[in-house]
Amino acid sequence: MVDRPKLLLGELPLQAQPALCRILDANLDRAREGLRIVEEWCRFGLNSSELAAECKQLRQEIAKWHTPELRAFRNTLGDVGTELTHPQEETRGSIGQLLQANLCRVQEALRVIEEYGKLYLAEMGSAFKQMRYRVYVLETNLLGYQRQQKLLQSSLYLVTSASEHLFAIVEAALEGGLTLVQYRDKTANDDVRLEIAARLRKLCHHYEALFIVNDRVDLAIAVDADGVHLGQQDMPIATARQLLGPHRIIGRSTTNPEEMQRAIAEGADYIGVGPVYATPTKVEKAATGLEYVRYAAQNATIPWFAIGGIDPSNLNDVLSAGADRIAVVRAIMQAEQPTLVTQYFISQLTRVQTLRNFRSHLAQSHN
Ligand SMILES: Cc1ncc(COP(=O)(O)OP(=O)(O)O)c(N)n1
Ligand SMILES: Cc1ncsc1CCOP(=O)(O)O
Ligand SMILES: [Mg+2]
């Protein structure tokens, strides 16, 4: 039996050979450029050496296929495509959109190489197929990482209540710098909830804020929310994790140390701590008081949000008890100026976080 030659180019009609090489050359470049753009964000934006290393490895693997022979066919001046741009390429609304567009560009380029590469070298198709799947994994990991980072950076959490001005209030708070929103609606029908949740998600993502759905994992999945918030009566975290996958956020309400430790052990990404004060928003739950906030400040190993009856008048007491993240309903939903209240909360929370970070750096440098 005669071995099949590895280089298949010669099997194509002569006039098709330069075109094939130009397609491969252009897409090998495109894939690496897109990866480089994503890599820079992983490195400088997310400080993730793991994600940056995966981008770099992929770039290096692609580079190995970019032979001088393929480059020799380059004819930039004769390329009719260099002047074709799409209006969306001229503007990028956010880092998220920029990453999305470039990951899509990389996936497209890898797919082109996978298909045309089969006509060039026997192994090229399967090698690029594998790389394309690696980019899908990279995309999911990147999204999950971005979500966790955003959660870590969020000090104020707006839990919504039904209101005829719901969207205007949420948008006003987002204008004030809010980065974490929970859709909480205990009465509406599912079709209404679905419609509201989908609109809220779009609004939150436009402002690069996380969007969480209260109670309902099915709704969270249906509208592609960033996560779900589960109370003690809701489904177990492990079941929710199975349904939501590893990259979405799961929050859990806790009212005492035991519930806190269980939520952490079960893999919650954050917890609610409270109600700190008695509140008409959640009448059936007794206030835990500031004692539980003090316990959380000493013992919580994941992000935690003090919740329940918190407003600008008692904020300082909650912060003094050790909180540096809070969740509120009425203080923003019923505010006359939701943007200003949001800005006030965030400025106070940032102030205590900065002070505490500074003190802990100082303490570390003395040890
Ligand atoms: C951030 C946050 N913390 C606590 C809760 C309360 O959840 P739960 O106990 O399930 O009560 P309901 O909100 O469902 O009435 C929350 N929603 N968010
Ligand atoms: C949902 C929830 N869970 C514990 S307290 C609370 C409501 C907090 O509402 P408010 O900020 O209006 O007191
Ligand atoms: Mg609940």
Image: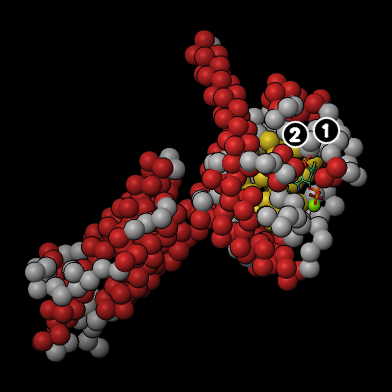
The answer to whether the residue labelled 2 contacts the one labelled 1, judged by CB atoms less than 8 Å apart, is yes
Residue 277: which numbered mark, if any? 1
Separation of residues labelled 2 and 1 (CA atoms): 7 Å
Disc 2 Cβ-to-ligand 2 distance below 8 Å? yes
Which residue is depicted at the point 63% across and 33% down? 345
Is 5 left or right of 236, judged from the image as shown?
left
- Which residue lies at the image location 51% right of the left edge and 55% below the top edge? 206
Q: How is the image coloured?
A: secondary structure
Asked if residue 235 lies left or right of residue 17, the reply is right
- In the image, farthest residue toward the top: 366
**Label 1: few (<14), some (14–19) or many (≥20) C-alpha neighbours in 10 Å:** some
> Looking at the picture, which amino acid does disc 2 mark?
Ile
How far from the left and from the top, in percent, is residue 130?
40, 67
**In the image, residue 346 lies at what x, y percent?**
59, 34
Nearest the viewer among 179 and 171 is 171
Q: Would the CB of label 1 be found within 8 Å of ligand 2?
A: yes
Q: In the visual, does 109 lie left or right of 311?
A: left
* Image quadrant containing the N terminus: bottom left
Q: Position of residue 40 (x, y in %)?
A: 34, 47
Above or below: residue 9 compared with residue 31:
below
Q: Nearer the viewer, residue 356 or 171?
A: 171
Which residue shows up at 8% across the image and 69% down it?
77
Q: Secondary structure at mark 1?
A: loop
In this rendering, the answer to whether 354 lies above or below 219 is: above
Determine whether, in the image, residue 244 is placed left or right of residue 362: right
Q: Is residue 248 visible?
A: no
Point out which mark residue 92 bears. none
Q: Nearer the viewer, residue 150 or 338?
A: 338
Q: Amino acid at mark 1?
A: Tyr
**Front-most of 264 and 156?**
156
Which residue does the numbered mark 2 point to in the structure image? 310
